[in-house]
Image: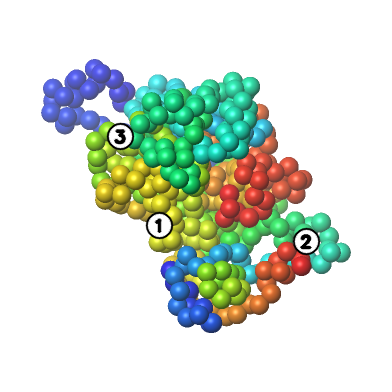
Amino acid sequence: MKYSIFSLARAAFSGHKTWQRTWRDASPKDHYDVVIIGGGGHGLATAWFLASEYGVRNVAVLEKGWIGSGNAGRNTTIIRSNYGLPGNTGFYELSMKLWERMEQDLNYNTMVSQRGVINLYHSDAQRDAYARRGNTMRINGIDAELLDLAAVRKMMPFLNFDNARFPVQGGLLQRRGGTARHDAVVWGYAHAASALGVDIIQNCEVSAFVRDANGKVTGVETTRGRIGAGKVGMAVAGSSSRVAAMAGLRLPIESHVLQAFVSEAIKPLIPNVMTFGAGHFYVSQSDKGGLVFGGDIDGYNSYAQRGNLPVMEDVCEGGMALMPMIGRVRLLRQWGGIMDMSMDGSPIIDRTPVDGLYLNAGWCYGGFKATPGSGLVFAHLLARDEPHEEAARFRLDRFRRGAMIDEKGQGAQPNLH
Amino acid sequence: MRIVCPFCGERELGEFTYLGDAKPVRPAASASEDEVFDYVYLRDNVAGQMSEYWYHGGGCRAWLKVTRNTLTHEISAVEPAAGVGARKVGA
């Protein structure tokens, strides 16, 4: 069904009893041209781009739980393209441009809100670093503005500008950045992909790969039976190592837990997405009024989807340093998701050494903003067997070649990225 | 999550720093490129019981080998592991 103001009016006059299901909950067929493991944002976006851009419509998305039940439903919904290194800069801007047309492309309200993303700076050295990053963005055709103290005061008068240790001195602003409604992104891709014939199969956990005599992957064993596949793509985030291990692969990835938090609803306060430059704290305010925020990963390997108190304390301290008045706001909910932390902090989108098996992983804790871009370039790889030009550096063998894309310069220590 | 340090007793997690999987062993200087690549970049990324190194920087400053379940965070063993930090960097 197509959504428009007319369909809304029609449904309103019939008491909203005529809405159809947004997407089709399919049962598995015997064989597909492409099977994608993982019904999160990336997997569903890949299926939609395969069907809409590359004409591959005999596609299934397999999800072990319900779609969007992993990190797609657990993130802090931030979208931006303020990266500094070749490889990342172009890719995230590709993704940003796809966010800007997503609602028209999918015929679904994903609530993309370009309210701006500002990274605050607190020292001269940090201003210089942000000026450099902003210049990198601008010479790549991405919007960036370096704001001085007066401009930040005007935009966010409520900040604790005179923090004795970390006074706010200004910020780097990307006006086109912002937020999107994460669940709607999942449903939007499911809606649009399903309409083009993609089978979305839930409660279908992959337990093994089916290989032919040459070792090529020709399908998957699942809790809903064997499903044949011309090609299999993995988009399983924190479970990447576990799924790859079924094909005998070891990946340059560790799984870590990242926590996110939401406060009780308050009146409109924070006009944008804001980050504290002297610690690790990022926050925006949801349309319902809750402050949605997060910080560092916990720092130890975990598959538990829950974190611990020291990081919670650290994140809240970051928030208090910027906005002491939020100390009187109650925390409503807190949760954890499992991040596929790569060895350089950047993603991997590539064929694997196993014929017929393709990998989309290593998003660390920045996968949400990449959703449309990741879908496009992974679909390109699956359809054409060669990398999309904006993902040509996200190769699995870059670690062996020494061609890392390490934004933070931390080296092969995933819990520091 | 609390860790029972063999020297200090049960302490909160914030006193400890994580190094990671205890299984990879730094290859000798004469090792092949493949062995070094494997050591630096590839991980088993265990889902289940894992041996790992923690540093008790907020207490006795000892290195510890902790056996922990990555699916549940349950810790089943903690033992001293003197010198692992230095060995990790080849010192």
**Disc 3 marks which residue?**
A269
Disc 3 secondary structure class = loop
Q: How many marks?
A: 3
Q: Can you see residue A171?
A: yes
Q: Is residue B28 left or right of residue A310?
A: right
The residue tagged 1 is: A313
Above-or-below relation of A107 to A343:
above
Q: Residue furthest top?
A: A6
| Residue toward you, A230 or A171 | A171
Determine the chain carrying the residue at label 1. A
Where's residue A185, x and y in %? 39, 35
Q: Which residue is mark 2?
A: B35
Q: Are marks 1 and 3 on the same chain?
A: yes
Confirm or deny contact between disc 3 and disc 2 (CB under 8 A).
no
Front residue of A79 and B62:
B62
The image quarter in which residue A380 lies: top right
User: Which amino acid is tagged 3?
Assistant: Leu
Determine crowd level at label 2: few under 14, some 14-19, many 20+ residues with C-alpha closer than 10 A.
few
Side (left or right) of A195 relative to B7 = left
Where residue A27 appears, x then y in whole percent? 39, 45
Residue that appears at 49% across and 26% down:
A147
